[in-house]
């Protein structure tokens, strides 16, 4: 499977001239978005329950509900890109579920004509477990059992913090950090769409680096199957 043919598309461009100081208060500026997203994610869960049964009995994801849930993920991605998921722009995120071509962060999912009625029973919990473990490393925040480290940041948060400190002192966002951060966000959003029943295509174990999907890849190869002992060869 090539980089560009996966049905979940994540694209972003880091803005030039980022403020050295604005990232310190973005958490406060985003309070209205956090309130909206809390309600939107409640709706996302409710819609997903309805969609589960629609796919189970009809093999289809109702188009209007599909566009709504894609919109929730799109809104979440724009807020994350502005805030501490990337710090890639100082342009305030728009309050809309629709794509905004002029905004530097984009998310979309190809609408599926048909979805497996069998896979819907297992893909969002059982099949996605390996990806959940990887995404937990990326995102962090409560995935470990030790109470002292339950709020530990993930790799994304740590790298964005490094980028913020570099930006503070040099007025420059390191491009290598941006590429890696976008790759991890892309992986997480692909898993979110798969777990949200939007596609039957299993997310690749691949870190597609950079703001644009074809910028570069780092592949995580699956383990090799065990070899038979020499004496068992025919």
Image (cartoon, rainbow, N blue to C red):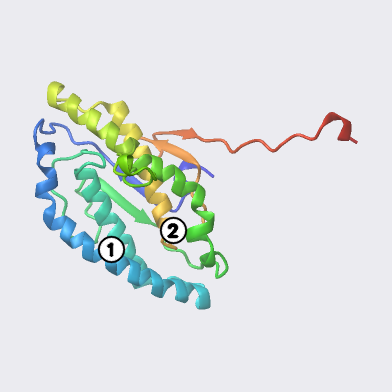
Mark 1 lies on a secondary structure that is helix
Left/right of residue 179 with respect to residue 30 in the rendered view: right
Could you say whether the residue bearing mark 2 is in a helix, strand or loop?
A: helix
Q: Residues within 10 Å of mark 2 (few under 14, many from 20)?
A: many
Q: In 3D space, how far apart are the residues under numbered discs 1 and 2 (Cα atoms)?
A: 14 Å
With respect to residue 177, does 104 lie above or below? below
- Residue at x-position 59% and y-position 38%: 222
Q: Vertical placement of 111 versus 232: above or below?
A: below
Quadrant of the frame with the N terminus: top right
Which quadrant holds residue 98?
bottom left
Which residue shows up at 42% across the image and 63% down it? 111
Circle 1 crowding by C-alpha within 10 Å: few under 14, some 14–19, many from 20? some
Instruction: Say which residue label 2 marks.
Output: 195
Residue 200 in view: no
- Name the residue carrying label 1: 41
Q: Position of residue 116 (x, y in %)?
A: 55, 67
In the image, residue 162 sits, relative to residue 207, either above or below, namely: above
Say which residue appears at 31% left-offset and 37% top-offset: 156
What x and y, as percent, mark residue 143?
38, 46
Q: Which mark is residue 176?
A: none
Q: Residue furthest front?
A: 147
The residue closer to the viewer here, 179 or 48, is: 48
Residue 149 rendering spot, x and y as whole percentages: 32, 40
Question: Residue 159, position in %: x, y?
Answer: 29, 32
């Amino acid at each position: 499977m090539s980089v560009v043919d996966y049905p979940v598309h994540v694209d972003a461009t880091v803005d030039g001239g980022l403020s050295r100081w604005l990232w310190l208060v973005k958490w406060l500026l985003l309070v209205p978005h956090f309130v909206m997203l809390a309600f939107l994610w409640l709706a996302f869960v409710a819609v997903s329950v309805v969609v589960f049964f629609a796919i189970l009995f009809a093999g289809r994801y109702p188009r209007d509900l599909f566009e709504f849930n894609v919109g929730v993920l799109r809104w979440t991605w724009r807020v994350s890109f502005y805030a501490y998921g990337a710090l890639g722009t100082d342009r305030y995120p728009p309050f809309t579920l629709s794509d905004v071509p002029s905004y530097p962060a984009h998310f979309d999912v190809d609408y599926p004509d048909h979805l497996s009625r069998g896979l819907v029973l297992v893909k969002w919990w059982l099949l996605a477990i390996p990806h959940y473990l990887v995404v937990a490393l990326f995102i962090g925040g409560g995935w470990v059992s030790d109470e002292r480290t339950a709020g530990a940041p993930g790799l994304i948060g740590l790298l964005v913090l490094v980028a913020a400190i570099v930006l503070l002192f040099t007025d420059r966002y390191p491009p290598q950090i941006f590429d890696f951060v976008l790759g991890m966000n892309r992986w997480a959003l692909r898993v979110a769409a798969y777990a949200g029943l939007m596609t039957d295509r299993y997310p690749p174990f691949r870190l597609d680096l950079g703001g644009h999907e074809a910028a570069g890849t780092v592949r995580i190869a699956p383990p090799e199957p065990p070899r038979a002992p020499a004496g068992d060869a025919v």
